[in-house]
Image (cartoon, rainbow, N blue to C red):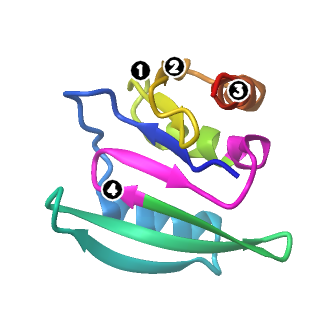
Amino acid sequence: MNAIYIAAPEGITWPLSGQDVERHLETRFPDVQIWHKYAPVSRSAYLDFEIDIDGEPRHGSYFDHRHLILRDAEPGFWADTIAWFLGLLPPGTNAVAMVESNPDEIRPVPAVATIRQITDLLDGLASDS
């Protein structure tokens, strides 16, 4: 399974702090487990989180103001969570997507992306690897 990266385009930051995302995750997933971490190489704070969905642990990370990483499931599984997350950003906020198996291909995410568009985008990135 590919890790999925949803990120602010280079040179841009998002207005969502780790605290904002933590609060939203706790609202959407009341049983979420969250750990606060720090990446010394990039000098950035981030959240690691675990969500139990359909009896399986699913993991993710959010780096303050920059990107969301989702693991342990295929793109179609995460598409609704990605759409929800993008909906937390102000209208018109730009985002790009990448999958772990194809790190050289980064594509823009449509401004108002549907679950189907997100799934198709991520499946396309994975199949191009």
| 94 w.r.t. 115: above or below | above
| 75 w.r.t. 21: above or below | above
| 74 w.r.t. 34: above or below | above
Disc 1 target residue:
92
Closer to the chain start, of discs 3 and 1, is: 1
Disc 2 target residue:
111
Q: CA distance from mark 1 to mark 4?
A: 20 Å
Disc 3 target residue:
114
Image quadrant containing the C terminus: top right
Q: Position of residue 109 (x, y in %)?
A: 53, 23
Closer to the chain start, of discs 3 and 4, is: 4
Q: CA distance from mark 4 to mark 2?
A: 21 Å
* Residue type marked 4: Phe
- Disc 2 residue crowd, few under 14, some 14–19, many 20+, Cα 10 Å: few
* Residue type marked 3: Thr
Q: Which residues are magenta?
A: 62-80
Closer to the chain start, of discs 2 and 1, is: 1
The residue positioned 66% from the left and 22% from the top of the image is 128
